[in-house]
Image (cartoon, grey):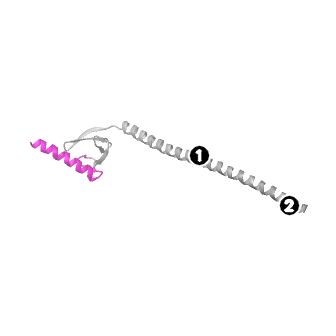
């Protein structure tokens, strides 16, 4: 009987050790999950922050390049524009076209939107001149 009692005592002891070990593993798992969550949160924040800083840097460099660009005021069909290195810009410094050739007598528009805006301004100026 003593051997059964010893076996049972040893078995209970082992079960308790396994339970303790299992509890430690659960706690460690919880701790690791919290660290992983924090790391992911930090990464997401830093990633978003880096993207935003990159965007701001791009805009800053782009603005500096625009500020350093020399523009000449020009008038095309009575409408005022700016020109730099053969490219035509509107009053907001938006690229709207380029000269067709070296004669600089025809604009190749970036798209129909700017061509139509020019045509509207031209028509208004023409109507004002006739009145």
- Tell which circle, 1 or 2, labels the residue nearer the N-terminal end: 2
Picture coordinates of residue 98, whole percent (x, y): 29, 48
Q: Mark 1 or mark 2, which is nearer to you?
A: 2
The residue under the point 40% across, 37% down is: 64
Q: Which residues lie in the magenta part?
A: 103-131
Instruction: Check disc 2 and report the residue beneath it.
Output: 7
Residue 89 location, x and y as percent?
A: 30, 43
Dot 2 surroundings within 10 Å: few (below 14), some, or many (20 or more)?
few
Q: Secondary structure at mark 1?
A: helix
How many labels sit on residues? 2
Please identify the dominant SS of the magenta region. Answer: helix
Residue 128, by quadrant, is top left
Which residue sits at x=76%, y=56%? 18
Q: Is residue 115 magenta?
A: yes
Instruction: Determine the image quadrant of residue 60.
Output: top left
Figure check: 3 above or below 67: below
Q: Is residue 107 visible?
A: no
Left or right: 39 with respect to 12?
A: left
**How far apart are the alpha carbons under marks 1 and 2?**
46 Å
Query: What is the number of the mark on residue 22?
Result: none
Q: Report x, y in % for residue 32.
A: 65, 49
Task: Tell me, for residue 38, which label it has, or none.
Answer: 1
Dot 1: few (<14), some (14–19), or many (≥20) neighbours within 10 Å? few
Left-right relation of 18 to 57: right
Q: Nearer the viewer, residue 69 or 41?
A: 41
Q: Considering the numbered disc 2 on the image, is that residue within a helix, a strand or a loop?
A: helix
Residue 12 position (above or below residue 49): below
Residue drawn at x 46%, y 43% is 52
- Image quadrant holding the N terminus, namely bottom right
């Amino acid at each position: 009987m003593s051997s059964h009692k010893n076996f049972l005592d040893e078995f209970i002891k082992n079960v308790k050790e396994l339970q303790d070990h299992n509890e430690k593993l659960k706690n460690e798992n919880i701790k690791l999950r919290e660290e992983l969550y924090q790391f992911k949160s930090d990464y997401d924040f830093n990633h978003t922050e880096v993207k935003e800083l990159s965007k701001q840097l791009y805009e800053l460099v782009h603005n500096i390049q625009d500020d350093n660009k020399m523009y000449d005021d020009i008038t095309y069909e009575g409408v005022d524009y700016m020109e730099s290195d053969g490219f035509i810009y509107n009053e907001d410094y938006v690229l709207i076209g380029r000269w067709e050739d070296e004669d600089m007598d025809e604009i190749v528009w970036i798209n129909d939107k700017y061509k139509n805006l020019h045509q509207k301004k031209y028509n208004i100026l023409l109507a004002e001149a006739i009145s």
